Amino acid sequence: MKASVIVFPGSNCDRDAAVALEAASGLAPSMVWHGDSELPASDLIVLPGGFSYGDYLRSGAMAAHSPVMREVVARARGGTPVLGICNGFQVLTEAGLLPGVLMRNATLKFICRDVLLRVERNDTGFTRRYAQGEVVRFALANKDGGYFAEEATLDRLEGEGRIAFRYCDETGEISAAANPNGSRRNIAGLYNENGTVLGLMPHPERLADPALGGTDGAKMFLSLVETLH
């Protein structure tokens, strides 16, 4: 699997993503600068976490209009899988590849801690190593992580099976108490119509090695390798 990681000014999880991808696939990904207008041939494109352009205007708003994103959008619409993590999720919504927006956390504070997620589907290239309904632990680190969309859009996403992960408790129950940032319907991750684009607020790459304190995130990268090898 040949992957490309997009690097924006202010990205701070690009190397983490690269390490996780290389551990899973055995191949180092291409690190593509935001100002480039071309992308190498890629089986997977990753938009990493961080604070692209210092989160000026809105988180991800400026990055969505950087030169490389024209090619990312074109590849995504052509079927190339794209994974946007944290700030990458924000960029995906700002670029129009996913609906809704990411708003300031309900606490109005930056959140940095592990969270529990329920896997809503395991029939996509991102989740085939998980069991449907499995509870996993990923790392959350954001200020603008509350997912918001109008009710009609949320109903459509539910009906189309496009919710990828939800914040939950240890038993998999979805509740307000398990929701760290006020995301509507506890949404932590979201697919596009074809299940080829995933926006995910918590970080799988930060819990993808025993040395990091957990390996639940590694299954996502191994799932992608199995799908795209």
Image: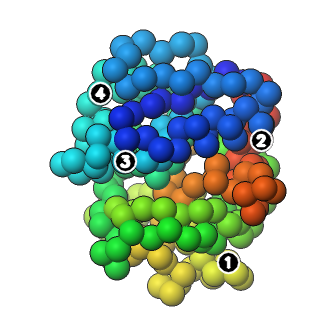
Q: Nearer the viewer, mark 2 or mark 1?
A: 2
Q: Quadrant of the N terminus?
A: top right
- Amino acid carrying label 1: it is Gly
The residue shown at (29%, 27%) is 66
Work out whether 121 lies above or below 178: above
**What is the CA distance from the residue labelled 3 to the residue labelled 4?**
14 Å
Residue 66: assigned label: 4
Q: Secondary structure at mark 3?
A: loop
* Amino acid at circle 4: Ser
Q: Depth check: 71 or 215 in front?
A: 215
Question: What's the amino acid at mark 2?
Answer: Leu
Give the CA distance from mark 1 to mark 4. 38 Å
Residues under numbered marks 3 and 4 in contact, where contact means CB atoms less than 8 Å apart: no
Per the image, the residue denoted by label 1 is 172
Q: Which of the 4 image quadrants contains residue 149?
A: bottom left
Earlier sequence position, callout 2 versus callout 1: 1
Q: Nearer the viewer, mark 4 or mark 2?
A: 4
